[in-house]
Image: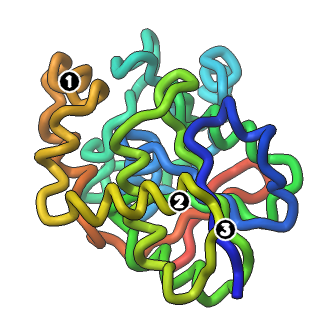
């Protein structure tokens, strides 16, 4: 039986052994939700970048560039970080270069040694759970957080994923135990508790209520996003 652990922030990743583990990157508002939405709607690949300039440079190589900082679309970028932008196949067949405040940094910090880097969201929660169960390998859930700090929405998702895996994975990780119980207490009305989150308020201030609602839809897609050789591509769960 594999084990499951949870890391609350990329700033804490050095405390964990990531070698030979499946790392699930979680940035519910909004990077990982956007990535899954993009892949499910036909985007061929996404290259994540931790800084704006490296991402911007990909435009000259035919990539659509998507950039976000502090919840806002970065200056000079075609796209920001909205999962809704990719609906209806708007960018089907396109290649995306993407940089965000938290999510792409979490990917960057997970590159060395992980068995697989997998994208997690409520949008593909059930498919992701089934994928991890079939792999029978240790799992580390890495919450992107907010600028190195704990955040509520990623932590609730980590609890939801741990809940879905508990019959197939063991844990001696206090963080995982705590977040599973947090999720269990609020699973009947996630939006209510997430409405209290600081990043919910940031997005509301930018009139992004539709993005919030979309990111909390469970099991909309069966797409699994895998980071491999510097880009994220999809497989079907």
Give coordinates of residue 98: x percent, y percent. Answer: 55, 35
**Disc count in the image?**
3
Earlier-in-chain disc, 1 versus 2: 2
Disc 3 + disc 1, Cβ < 8 Å: no
Q: Which mark is residue 201?
A: 1
Residue at 38% across, 33% down: 81
Mark 1, residues whose alpha carbon is within 10 Å: few (<14), some, or many (≥20)? some
Please tell me how crowded label 3 is: few (under 14), some (14-19), or many (20+) other residues with Cα within 10 Å: many
Q: Residues within 10 Å of mark 2 (few under 14, many from 20)?
A: many
User: Mark 3 to mark 2: distance in Å?
Assistant: 11 Å
* Residue under numbered circle 2: 176
How far from the left and from the top, in percent, is residue 31?
Answer: 45, 41
In screen coordinates, is 39 left or right of 16?
left
Q: Which residue is mark 3?
A: 139
- Say what secondary structure mark 1 lies in: helix
Q: Give the mark, 3 or 1, whose residue is nearer the N terminus.
A: 3
In the rendered view, tell whether residue 80 sits above or below residue 167. above
- Between the residue at mark 3 and the residue at mark 1, the CA separation in whole angstroms equals 31 Å
With 191 as the anchor, is 18 left or right in this view? right
Relative horizontal placement of residue 49, taking residue 143 as reference (left or right): right
Q: Position of residue 134 (x, y in %)?
A: 62, 89
Q: Nearer the viewer, residue 135 or 35?
A: 135
């Amino acid at each position: 039986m594999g084990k499951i652990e949870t890391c609350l922030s990329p700033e804490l990743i050095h405390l964990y052994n990531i070698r030979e583990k499946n790392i699930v990157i979680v940035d519910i508002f909004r990077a990982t939700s956007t990535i899954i939405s993009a892949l499910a709607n036909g985007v061929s690949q996404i290259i994540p970048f931790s800084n704006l300039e490296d991402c911007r440079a990909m435009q000259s190589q035919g990539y659509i560039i998507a950039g976000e900082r502090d919840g806002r679309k970065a200056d000079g970028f075609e796209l920001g970080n909205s999962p809704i932008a990719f609906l209806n196949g708007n960018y089907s067949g396109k290649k995306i270069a993407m940089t965000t405040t938290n999510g792409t940094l979490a990917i960057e910090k997970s590159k060395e040694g992980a068995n697989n880097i997998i994208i997690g969201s409520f949008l593909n929660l059930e498919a992701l759970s089934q994928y991890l169960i079939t792999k029978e390998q240790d799992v580390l859930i890495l919450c992107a957080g907010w600028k190195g700090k704990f955040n509520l929405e990623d932590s609730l998702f980590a609890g939801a994923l741990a809940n879905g895996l508990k019959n197939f994975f063991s844990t001696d990780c206090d963080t995982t135990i705590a977040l599973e119980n947090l999720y269990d207490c609020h699973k009947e009305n996630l939006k209510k508790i997430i409405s209290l989150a600081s990043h919910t308020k940031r997005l509301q201030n930018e009139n992004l209520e539709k993005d919030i609602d979309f990111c909390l839809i469970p099991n909309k897609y069966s797409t699994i996003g895998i980071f491999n050789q510097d880009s994220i591509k999809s497989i079907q769960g």
